[in-house]
């Protein structure tokens, strides 16, 4: 039942947006002029396209995020059983965390955590 | 009060009139309708509350003209949004441009349907609930990136990139705080997490590490929702409106609704994981007080806590000035992530040693 509900909610969210859009298109006025479909920037015609090479700093943070997010994925199953496993689970995860924190420290040392 | 008695009663009623498949279809339709209506209703309440709270913090009265005490203002706004023309931009990537609001709304509706409003009043209750929450809330950033990328507008692009960098970074802290509470609760199922808080909320059970996690969660949750002081993805004075500059009418309206609902969802998750969800206040030893608290229905507790956290977030929003992008990233990576990791270990030590209440 849970999975059926999950798909129901996905469909419901799509229907919500589609219905809103349809009603808006149905009752809103429509007019056309050439200026209206220009992109809004500063009021003057835009220079060139926006789809250009972008600052690499964002990419660097995405890579770092990936590393730590994978870590979170690994830690979630561990977190549910840590109460039963007790001290063994703590010692085991200390090694895992040590390697991760080493990675963070390396990134910090290399100044990858600062915005340049 | 247990809502599952009501839902089973409806289920049995439907089963007497219809075959199996029709019952499932009807129930799905009913649940979807209820949740979507609740979603829209809470969005309207949130928008009104935002305007009134903001006005109160700035010593103004806020909207007063439409309806008594301005109560109909938001309905007027929604209607205005509906009758605005949806302008399509000539130079944009049309498919991605119109896909973006769907993804943003889908992410927040899915997260919304995981929230436990009362015992038995929860649509999606997976055994990996917290994990699903993270997964569902994290693909909203995809919609924002698409909106900025497809608009073919420099402001949108910069806003989307800032938003992407900020949201994925702070998701880490949100994840670590949730992980800390999962360690304390020992389960990922949301209903089970709330059940185990009936004899004391997690913020009291987990004392110091839980309090640290709560503060980090509030900061990171605020950044996740792109609100001041972390509103640089849509900083009005620099980027017009950030990633939704090119959206008009209802197209923009859905971004707006999803943004407000994300605040609601972040607060509701905070109150579920830390403040006990629908569990009433329980103080060991004071049986009379606990009995009185037990009479207040769960849904009142849940909404009360949620709106309290929302009010805290609004207070933060109207108090602090906006950060710069480098400050935002340094705050996350050099302060919140290391503190979160150490805090997780601290919580694990407390749980393993039995130093929790």
Image: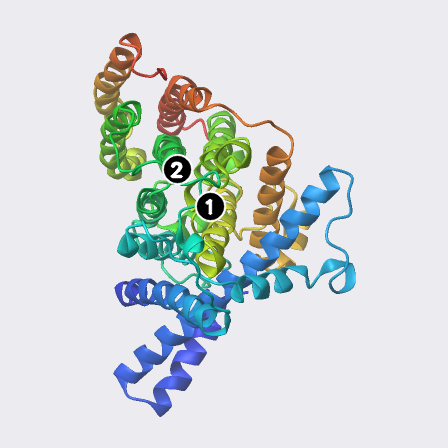
The label on residue B171 is: none
Q: Foreground residue, B325 or B12?
A: B325
Q: Foreground residue, B224 or A72?
A: B224
Q: Position of residue B330 (x, y in %)?
A: 41, 19
Question: Which numbered disc flags the more N-terminal residue, 1 or 2?
Answer: 2
Question: As displayed, is residue B223 above or below residue B323?
Answer: below
Q: Chain of mark 1?
A: B
Q: Position of residue B71 (x, y in %)?
A: 71, 61
Q: Chain of mark 2?
A: B
Instruction: Determine the residue positioned at 72% across, 38% down.
Output: B57
Give how far apart the Cα atoms at labels 1 and 2 are. Answer: 9 Å
Looking at the image, can residue B259 be seen? yes
**Residue sitting farthest toward the top:** A109
Question: As displayed, is residue B215 above or below residue A32?
Answer: above
From the image, tell me which residue sits under label 2.
B178
Q: Quadrant of residue A15?
A: bottom left
Q: Residues within 10 Å of mark 2 (few under 14, many from 20)?
A: many
Q: Position of residue A59 (x, y in %)?
A: 26, 27
Q: Quadrant of residue B159?
A: top left
Residue B6 left/right relative to B190:
right
Quadrant (top left, top right, bottom left, bottom right) of the N terminus of chain B: bottom right
Instruction: Determine the residue positioned at 37% across, 53% down.
Output: B89
Residue B118 left/right relative to B19:
right
Question: As displayed, is residue B321 above or below residue B146?
Answer: above
Q: Are marks 1 and 2 in one subunit?
A: yes
Instruction: Determine the residue positioned at 39% across, 17% down.
Output: B334
Tag 2 secondary structure: helix
Q: Are marks 1 and 2 in contact (CB under 8 Å)?
A: yes
Tag 1 secondary structure: helix
Instruction: Determine the residue positioned at 61% across, 28% down.
Output: B320
The label on residue B269 is: 1
Q: Residues within 10 Å of mark 1 (few under 14, many from 20)?
A: many
């Amino acid at each position: 039942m849970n999975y059926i509900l999950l798909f129901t909610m996905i469909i419901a969210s799509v229907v919500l947006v589609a219905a809103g859009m349809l009603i808006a298109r149905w009752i809103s006025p429509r007019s056309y002029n050439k200026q209206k479909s220009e992109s809004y920037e500063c009021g003057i015609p835009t220079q060139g396209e926006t789809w250009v090479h972008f600052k690499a700093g964002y990419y660097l943070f995405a890579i770092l995020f990936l590393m730590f997010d994978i870590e979170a994925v690994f830690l979630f199953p561990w977190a549910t059983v840590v109460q039963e496993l007790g001290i063994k689970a703590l010692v085991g995860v200390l090694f895992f965390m040590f390697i991760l924190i080493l990675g963070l420290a390396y990134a910090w040392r290399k100044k990858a955590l600062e915005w340049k | 009060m247990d809502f599952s008695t009501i839902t089973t009663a409806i289920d049995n009623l439907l089963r007497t009139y219809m075959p199996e498949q029709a019952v499932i279809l009807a129930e799905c339709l009913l649940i979807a309708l209820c949740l979507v209506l609740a979603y829209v209703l809470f969005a309207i309440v949130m928008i009104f509350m935002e305007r009134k709270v903001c006005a109160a913090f700035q010593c103004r009265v806020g909207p007063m003209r439409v309806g008594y005490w301005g109560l109909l203002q938001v309905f007027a706004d929604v209607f205005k949004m509906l009758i605005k023309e949806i302008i399509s931009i000539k130079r944009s990537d049309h498919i991605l441009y119109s896909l973006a609001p769907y993804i943003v709304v889908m992410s927040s509706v899915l997260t919304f349907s995981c929230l436990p409003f009362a015992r038995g009043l929860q649509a999606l209750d997976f055994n990996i609930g917290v994990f699903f929450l993270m997964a569902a809330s994290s693909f909203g950033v995809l919609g924002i990136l698409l909106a900025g990328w497809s608009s073919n507008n420099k402001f949108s692009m910069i806003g989307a990139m800032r938003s992407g960098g900020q949201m994925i970074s702070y998701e880490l802290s949100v994840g670590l705080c949730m992980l800390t509470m999962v360690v304390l609760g020992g389960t990922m199922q949301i209903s089970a997490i709330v059940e185990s808080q009936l004899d004391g909320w997690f913020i009291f059970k987990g004392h110091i590490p839980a309090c640290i996690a709560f503060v980090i969660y509030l900061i990171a949750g605020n950044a996740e929702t792109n609100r001041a002081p972390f509103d640089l993805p849509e900083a009005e004075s620099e980027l017009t409106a950030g990633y939704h500059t090119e959206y008009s009418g209802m197209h923009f309206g859905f971004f707006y609704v999803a943004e407000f609902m994300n605040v609601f969802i972040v607060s509701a998750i905070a109150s579920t994981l830390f403040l006990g969800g629908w569990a009433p206040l329980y103080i060991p030893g004071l049986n009379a007080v606990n009995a009185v608290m037990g009479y207040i229905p769960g849904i009142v507790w849940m909404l009360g806590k949620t709106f309290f956290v929302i009010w805290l977030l609004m207070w933060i929003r109207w108090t602090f000035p906006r950060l710069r992008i480098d400050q935002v990233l340094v705050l996350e990576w050099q302060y919140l992530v290391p503190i979160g990791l150490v805090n997780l270990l601290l919580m694990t030590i407390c749980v393993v040693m039995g130093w929790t209440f």
